[in-house]
């Protein structure tokens, strides 16, 4: 295999062999840090209409998600809140970063997404953040939308 083929993204060669056209790159995140000895878990999440989702939390390693249906209200520490619609992706670097929101952005329809999370040995896959820590880090949260 040539060096270019090893580093090419599938789906990037419209005139190439079938395998290069069969895949569409949805997300390309770099750089990422995966804890040594990490484990990984892929889950399917279904939120009822308007469900706020998981309380503020963090992961010890990166997490990568794909919205199957509906729309996810997504917010990471230091980034503005955004809505990721069906067919869209999201990722978080893990470590110390707080994930504030992952709830259903739709008041009248279900939302479903798949997320793969990586976890350091001996750590929980997801760790909720205490109120006291949220208050002490409030200055790191992006400004909230008016409303």
Image (spheres, grey):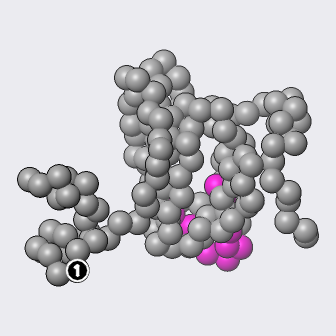
Q: Residue at x 57, y 38 (%)?
A: 94
Identity of the residue furthest to the top in this view: 122
Q: In this view of the protein, can residue 69 be seen by the observer? A: no
Q: Residue 109: within the magenta?
A: yes
Determine whether, in the image, residue 38 is placed left or right of residue 15. right
What residue does disc 1 label? 14
Residue at 55% x, 42% y: name it.
93
Residue at x 67% of width, y 45% of height: 99
Is 138 placed left or right of 114 in the picture? Answer: right
In the depicted view, which residue is nearer to us: 1 or 33?
A: 1
Above or below, comparing residue 110 to residue 93 in the picture: below
At which x and y percent is residue 30? 46, 49
Disc 1 packing (10 Å; few <14; some 14–19; many ≥20): few
Q: Is residue 56 magenta?
A: no
Range of magenta residues: 102-113
Give residue 137's position: percent from left, percent from top.
Answer: 83, 36
Looking at the image, residue 129 sits to the left or right of residue 102; the answer is right
Between 49 and 2, the one nearer to me in the picture: 2
Relative height, residue 111 to residue 103 (above, below): below
């Amino acid at each position: 295999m040539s060096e270019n083929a090893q580093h090419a993204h599938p789906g990037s060669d419209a005139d190439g062999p079938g395998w290069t056209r069969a895949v569409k790159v949805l997300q390309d995140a770099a750089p990422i840090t995966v804890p040594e000895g990490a484990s990984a878990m892929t889950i399917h999440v279904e939120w009822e209409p308007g469900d706020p989702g998981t309380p503020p939390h963090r992961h010890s390693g990166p997490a990568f998600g794909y919205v199957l249906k509906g729309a996810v209200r997504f917010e990471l520490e230091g980034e503005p809140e955004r809505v990721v619609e069906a067919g869209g992706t999201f990722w978080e670097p893990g470590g110390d970063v707080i994930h504030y929101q992952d709830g259903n952005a739709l008041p009248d329809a279900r939302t479903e997404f798949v997320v793969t999370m990586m976890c350091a040995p001996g750590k929980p896959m997801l760790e909720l953040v205490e109120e006291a820590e949220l208050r002490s880090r409030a200055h790191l949260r992006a400004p909230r939308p008016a409303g």
